[in-house]
Image (spheres, rainbow, N blue to C red):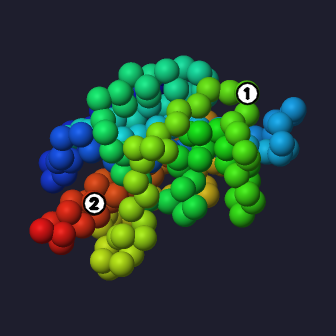
Amino acid sequence: MIRRVTKLTDVKMPDGIMVLDIECVKERVANWVHPFRFRTVMIGFVKGNEAIQLASNNLDELISAALAELSDFQIFVFEATRDFDIEVLRGRWTSARKAFANGPGPWATIDLSNRAVNMRREFTKKGLMVSMVDRTEDIASVACIAHWLKGDREPVFRHNLLDLIETSRRYLAFERSER
């Protein structure tokens, strides 16, 4: 298990609100409704002014560590197409552009759906889907899988951290616009 903490100088999330972002790999599975699933290998979140990244190839270990970090928060903010992050954590995401499974597979899961808010549409309505971080040294989201599988973890950590910072900045800009 890897746990990284990065102090953020220009981001401070309000009490009780956490930004969440995951990275995962696609893998073949047997004895489930679909032959593939996405397995979480990294869960990143911003609490106050800290970005915390948990990473492990052992899903049970990763979920256990994440539950300990997530217990004090009421709202989890994320941005994703079709609720990807939350559905992967719930164990229901089968494959891109396919329907969710009715229930999770036989692996560790976290169900945050009753406390998770996908802000993607709200950010788009407010014109906040512009880049809020320098992505010059970043990799594409889809490239995270290949980097992780070949053991090249640093680009995945960097990508996840940039996603966390960007979503946090968007959320704080959204909150200011609502006042």
State the image coordinates of residue 29 (x, y, percent, origin top left): 82, 36
Camera sees residue 115: yes
Residue denoted by label 1: 106
Residue at 45% x, 44% y: name it.
114
- The mark that comes first in sequence, 2 or 1, is 1
Q: Is residue 83 left or right of residue 175?
A: right
Say which amino acid is labelled 2.
Answer: Tyr
* Nearer to us in this view, 40 or 98: 98
Q: Is residue 103 above or below residue 164?
A: above
Residue at 28%, 55% in the rendered image: 168
78 to 45, vertically: above or below: below
Q: Which mark is residue 40?
A: none
Residue under pointer 2: 171
Residues packed near mark 2 inside 10 Å, few (<14), some (14 to 19) or many (20 plus): many
Which of the 4 image quadrants contains residue 37? top right
Residue at (40%, 54%) from the top-left corner?
Answer: 117
Q: Is residue 123 left or right of residue 87?
A: left
Percent coordinates x, y for residue 84 in the rendering: 57, 54
Which of 21 and 31 lies nearest the eye of the viewer? 31
User: Circle 1 — which element?
Assistant: loop
**How far across and down, in percent of the image, does residue 149 sit?**
66, 40
